[in-house]
Every structure is written in structure tokens, then in C-alpha cells.
Image (spheres, helix red, strand yellow):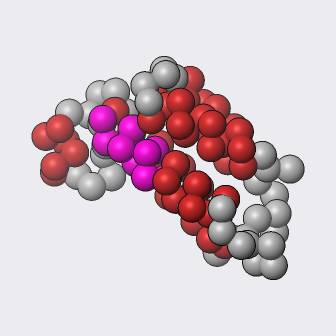
């Protein structure tokens, strides 16, 4: 079962520079891959999937010029910003009422 609090803590620590980027990526991918179909509602899945896609677009080889030319390439500073956004969205999700919204991710 997905532990939202663990993901939230991971995002917070990474956003605050307390987690090395590669370890963050590895941990997040492992947590994301553990999601079972129908386990979470579509809104939560969307938040988590957006960050998964950002991690997929990240490489230590990309430069700010690469990022400007190709929207599917992001640098470490951008990934940290995206993690901060996801952290905020996840906090909003966690404190909202989602008790009756279990849908399959689309």
C-alpha cells in the first residue's frame, strides 16, 4: 500500500536540499512503481505521475541551454522546483477530503 506520508517526507527533504538527487530519484521511482491500479484516486495519481515524468526528464548532463531548447530535458534546479510544487500539491491533497474518490488512474 502506498504511504503518502513517506512520499511527502521524501519530497520535503529533497526540496530542502537534504537528499542527494540520485538517491531521491531512485527512492521516488521505487515508491511510484509500487502503486497498484485502483489503489489511489486520479487526483493523487496525477500529482505523483507529474513528478515521475519530471524525474524521467532529468539528467545531470542537461544544461540550462538544453532545458530551454527541449521541454523534455530538465536540470537539477528545475527538478528541485518541480519537487517543491509536488510537495505543496501533496500537502493540499493530504489535508483535503478525498475519502470517496478512489478511481483508476487515467
Q: In this view, does 78 lie above or below 51?
A: above
- Tell me which corner region of the image, top left, top right, bottom left or bottom right, holds residue 91: bottom right
The question of residue 41 being in magenta is answered with: no
Given residues 58 and 81, the one toward you in this image is: 81
Quadrant of res 62 = top left
Side of 62 relative to 65 (left or right): right
- Please name whichever residue, 35 or 86, is drawn nearer the observer in this view of the structure: 86
Left of 97 or right of it: where is 12?
A: left
Place of residue 15 in the rendered image (x, y in percent of width and height, measured from the top left): 45, 35
Relative to residue 66, is residue 27 drawn left or right? right
Is residue 16 toward the left or the right of residue 34 in the image?
left
- Identify which residue is drawn at 73% across, 72% down: 98
Q: Is the magenta stretch mostly helix, strand or loop?
A: helix
Q: State how many labels appear.
A: 0
Whether 40 is drawn above or below 33: the answer is: below
Q: Of 39 and 3, which appears nearest the observer? A: 3
User: Can you give x and y, in whole percent of width and height, for residue 11 in the image?
Assistant: 55, 39
Q: Position of residue 24 (x, y in %)?
A: 55, 30
Q: Can residue 22 be seen in this view?
A: no
Q: Looking at the image, is 3 positioned above or below residue 48?
A: above
> Range of the magenta residues?
77-86
Q: Which residue is drawn at 71% across and 73% down?
A: 97
Quadrant, the C terminus: bottom right
Q: Is residue 80 visible?
A: yes
Q: Residue at x 82, y 63 (%)?
A: 39
In the image shown, does 6 or 27 lie closer to the viewer?
6
**Looking at the picture, how far across and down is residue 84, in whole percent?**
43, 45
Farthest right residue? 1
Amino acid at each position: 500500500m502506498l504511504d503518502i506520508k513517506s512520499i511527502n517526507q521524501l519530497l520535503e527533504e529533497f526540496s530542502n536540499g537534504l537528499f542527494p538527487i540520485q538517491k531521491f530519484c531512485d527512492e521516488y521511482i521505487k515508491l511510484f512503481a509500487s502503486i497498484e491500479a485502483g489503489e489511489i484516486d486520479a487526483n493523487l495519481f496525477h500529482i505523483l505521475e507529474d513528478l515521475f515524468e519530471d524525474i524521467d526528464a532529468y539528467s545531470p548532463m542537461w544544461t540550462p541551454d538544453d532545458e530551454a531548447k527541449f521541454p523534455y530535458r530538465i536540470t537539477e534546479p528545475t527538478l528541485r522546483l518541480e519537487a517543491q510544487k509536488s510537495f505543496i500539491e501533496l500537502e493540499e491533497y493530504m489535508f483535503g477530503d478525498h475519502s470517496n474518490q478512489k478511481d483508476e488512474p487515467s
